[in-house]
Image: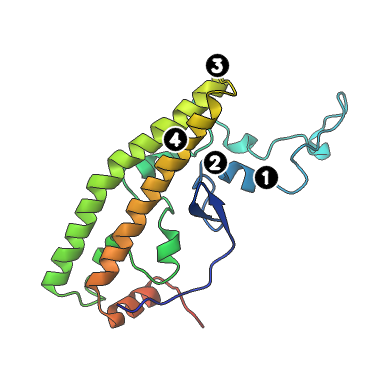
Amino acid sequence: MTIVRFPIRPAFVVSGFILLAVVQPGFSYLTAAQESTPPGQHGNHAPVGEATPESGTRSPYADVYDPDAPIRALTAELVEQIRQGQGASLALPAELNGVPGPRHVLDFAEQLNLSPDQQAQVQEVFDRYLVEAIPAGERYLAAAQALEEGFRTGTMTEEDLPGLVADVSRLEGELVTIHLTAHLRTADILTPEQISAYNQLRGYDQG
């Protein structure tokens, strides 16, 4: 197996697994909100009575804030992707470093000239991935919701907080691992030429 490597942007490490800065807001429940805040907005409040839009008091999250959302720190689109077992940008550490994922390989079966045996093997990887990713995604979303509910209901305590945060981190890590494992299994099925062709089709040009 030949892996084509591409440079990626700086990453953040949370509880032992990598969260890329290139992903859409919401990829990491624990870091996305902080990373999307413009410089100088944290802790930079105008005096009472002087608050105006020009003074920078409006939250950068106001436009996407949904008071009815069970998980306010994740977009509805991202929640739906996770529930359906879709990519949700969780496999970017593999995808952007030349390791194809099963769904897109199946989409490009004709262009990649997959043999019937290869196509069957990749389909098996994808089916197994869905069986694992969908329930793992539900567990992760449940943990994220439990963390928010503690704050929303005013019942959060300093004693409860570490365990709830650890649950979110652990379950997010499990979900990321499932996504990345599917990419590894897919790459093992392909030839070096097919992997190179995949990356060209996806627009990952090394120049």
Label 4 or label 2, whichever lies nearer to me, is: 4
Q: Residue at x 45, y 73 (%)?
A: 204
Q: Which mark is residue 86?
A: none
> From the viewer's perspective, is the residue at label 3 or at label 1 nearer?
3
Say if mark 3 contacts mark 2, CB within 8 Å: no
Residue where numbered disc 3 is placed: 155
- Residue behind mark 4: 167
Q: Earlier in the sequence, mark 3 or mark 1?
A: 1
| Mark 4 surroundings within 10 Å by alpha-carbon count, few (fewer than 14), some (14 through 19), many (20 or more) | some
In the image: residue 13, left or right of residue 100: right
Residue plotted at (67% across, 40% down)? 60
Relative to 175, say whether 114 is above or below. Answer: below
For the residue labelled by badge 2, is the local secondary structure a helix, a strand or a loop?
Answer: loop
Q: Residue at x 44, y 35 (%)?
A: 167
Which callout, 1 or 4, points at the residue further toward the start of the chain? 1
Q: Look at mark 2 in the image and give the residue it sits on.
A: 30
Q: Amino acid at mark 4?
A: Asp
Judge the density around disc 2: few (<14), some (14-19), many (≥20) Cα neighbours within 10 Å.
Answer: some
Identify residue type, mark 2: Leu
Residues under labels 4 and 2: Cα distance? 11 Å
| Residue at the spot 12% in from the left edge and 70% down from the top edge | 117
Residue 124 appears left or right of 37: left
Q: How is the image coloured?
A: rainbow
Q: Is residue 69 visible?
A: no
The kind of residue on which mark 3 rests is: Thr
Distance of mark 2 from mark 1, alpha carbons?
A: 13 Å
Q: Which residue is mark 1?
A: 37
- Using the numbered discs, state the Cα–Cα distance from disc 3 to disc 1 in whole angstroms: 26 Å
